[in-house]
Amino acid sequence: MKTTLITTASLLLCLTCAPAADEQLALWNDPQFRRQFMGSYGVRSDIEPSFTAAEKELMDQVLALLSKPKGMPKAVNMLKSVIMPTHSAVFDYTLGSFYFQLNEPDAAILWYRKALAKFPSFLRAHKNLGMVLVRSNKLDEAVAPLTRAIELGDNDGLTYGLLGFTYLMTEQYSSALYAYQQAMMLQPDATDWQLGMARCLFKLNRFHDAAALCDQMIARKPDAHEYWILQANAYLGMGSAIKAAENYEYIALQGGANTDCLNTLGDIYVNEGLMELATDAYLRAMRLYKGEAADHFIRNAEVLAARSAHAESANVITAIREHFAGKLPPEQLTRILKLEAKLAAARGAAPAEQIAMLEEIVKLDPLDGDALILLGQQYAGNGQLQKAIFAFEQAATLESFEARACLRHAQALVKNSQFAEAIPLLKRAQSVAPSDSVGEYLDQVEKIARSHR
């Protein structure tokens, strides 16, 4: 049965299909959105608080400052100096909107809430409070004002879209999908809502629908690599790995691939048994990598070796040594040396070469039980029984390796006809980790030992 790699792919799915917690929507920088927001200072008397003639005159003076140089800070200062608890909630709302424009979200939230304390059914205060809470990544708090705005009659694509984004980010995917559907009906060309809807479809395992929606998004904006990645992940969900690989290769040809993309591409090729293509993808990923952590690339070499792609694994190891020359910490260097030792054994390298590699590993990490046991086996196979016994005894002092070390030690003694000496070791191995096969082997050794008395 083929084992599917999921480490890189799962990580990438998380990054591309579930937005990062601090992700910002494109609409915040949309000039049209800003114009609409600036136009929201007027009064809608049917669902919002009114104010007296004197209050209107005062508000007109405040708003007149907006057309002057540095008008917004001046308007804020003037409004703060005159606002009173008895004033209309429109004053608090307007001051909150000024602070939102000045990118002071905490102050904006404070004044929007003051407006709602005065006039609880203030639709635009609910809407703008929800908006600034989304912008401030206070998503759990944003749901209530956004849904209340809709209850009060707001039928705007922006409100539905922000509500969809909030539900998506809090992993309420069915609710998010419904909100995005309403948003797209009202704003069919809004890319934020299309992307959000595609992510919801993916999270709901509706991979065919997600891939089809990505087709529409790609047709409109073919240079948006995020759409290609999301569609590739949908293809993976559908089981169409080669189609996913085609998407990643397209991104790479366009110069948009990063290390994660290419590592995922390599994993796809490994799963498909295309080891040369996998190696090429892994090497391309390494060439793009500017960091100092080699762990994932060592993992790539280990994956290839596990699939018996020994030459390809060796190529990746060579590239790792070149790319991270002088930067590999002992634990990473140990992993590489252990893998090189396994590859050397697989290609039938001379015992002396394998022993030298394992000795280097043990030198770097004297508590590496795997390396000690392998070294003991190599010594035993090379006729160096005393060195083998020393290595096995060192490994046996490590709790998680004791049973294996005792078994290998006993096997080495049996091969040298030291049957009686092997029996206590086999009994110890059986007491630490009981096994039918070890029990049967112990019975056989005991019979042979009795026959040699």
Image (cartoon, helix red, strand yellow):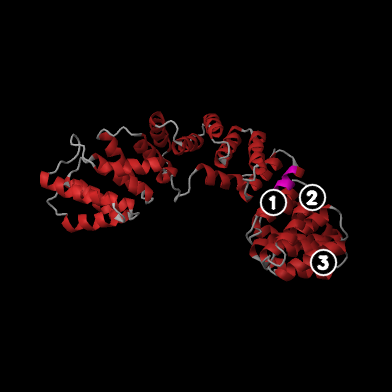
Could you tell me the amino acid type at mark 1? Answer: Asn
Q: Residue at x 11, y 44 (%)?
A: 53
Looking at this view, is 100 or 175 the one in front?
100
Q: Examine the structure image and report whether residue 278 is included in the region drawn in magenta.
A: yes
What residue is shown with label 2? 310
Separation of residues labelled 2 and 1 (CA atoms): 12 Å
Could you tell me the amino acid type at mark 3? Answer: Ala
**Stretch of the chain drawn in magenta:** 277-284
Q: Is residue 389 left or right of residue 160?
A: right
Q: How many marks?
A: 3
Question: Quick one: label 1, few (<14), some, or many (20+) residues within 10 Å?
Answer: many
Tell me which label, 2 or 3, sits earlier in the chain: 2
Above or below residue 212? Residue 362 is: below
Residue 381, horizontal then vertical, whole percent: 86, 61
What residue is shown with label 3? 356
What residue is shown with label 1? 300
Tell me which label, 2 or 1, sits earlier in the chain: 1
